[in-house]
């Protein structure tokens, strides 16, 4: 049950090689974050820790 919405742009980073979190888990995010953007990365679960400069670049965008 969604009780509110986020009215700011949201970028969801989706690591495509994550063995724990499926990209399908992001279905329905638009319901509470209408300004969502999904960014797929060809990487695994630890991508933010192993590629901090890439993450910082995406956050600046």
Image (spheres, grey):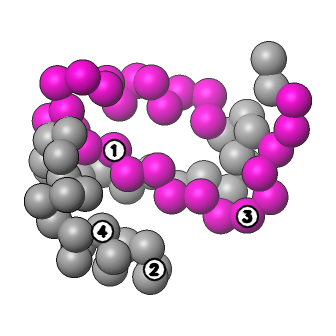
What residue is rendered at 46% in x and 50% in y?
Answer: 12
Q: Tell me how far mark 2 sits from mark 3, CA to CA.
A: 14 Å
Query: Residue 2 falls in which quadrant of the image?
Result: top right
Q: Tell me how far mark 4 sits from mark 1, CA to CA.
A: 12 Å
Q: Say which residue label 4 marks.
A: 55
Q: Tell me how far mark 3 sits from mark 1, CA to CA.
A: 19 Å
What residue is rendered at 70% in x and 46% in y?
Answer: 33
- Say which label, 2 or 3, has the lower sequence index: 3
Residue 8 is labelled as 3
Q: Say which residue label 2 marks.
A: 61
Crowding at dot 3, Cα within 10 Å, few <14 / some 14-19 / many 20+, comes out as: few
* 7 to the left or right of 29: right
Q: Say which residue label 1 marks.
A: 14
Crowding at dot 1, Cα within 10 Å, few <14 / some 14-19 / many 20+, comes out as: many
Q: Return the residue found at the far front.
A: 49
- The boundaries of the magenta stretch are 3-29
- Say which label, 4 or 1, has the lower sequence index: 1
Q: Nearer the viewer, mark 4 or mark 1?
A: 4
Identify which residue, 37 or 21, lies in the foreground.
21
Residue 53 is labelled as none
Q: Tell me how far mark 2 sits from mark 1, CA to CA.
A: 16 Å
Cβ atoms under marks 3 and 1 closer than 8 Å: no
Magenta-span inclusion, residue 27: yes
Q: Tell me how far mark 4 sits from mark 3, CA to CA.
A: 19 Å
Crowding at dot 2, Cα within 10 Å, few <14 / some 14-19 / many 20+, comes out as: few
Circle 1: element type: strand
- Say which label, 2 or 1, has the lower sequence index: 1
Identify which residue, 45 or 11, lies in the foreground.
45
Q: Nearer the viewer, mark 2 or mark 4?
A: 4
- Say which label, 3 or 1, has the lower sequence index: 3
- Say which label, 2 or 4, has the lower sequence index: 4
């Amino acid at each position: 049950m969604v009780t509110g919405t986020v009215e700011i742009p949201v970028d969801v980073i989706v690591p495509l090689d994550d063995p724990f979190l499926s990209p399908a888990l992001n279905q329905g995010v638009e319901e509470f974050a209408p300004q969502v953007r999904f960014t797929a990365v060809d990487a695994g679960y630890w991508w933010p820790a192993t590629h901090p400069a890439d993450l910082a670049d995406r956050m600046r965008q």
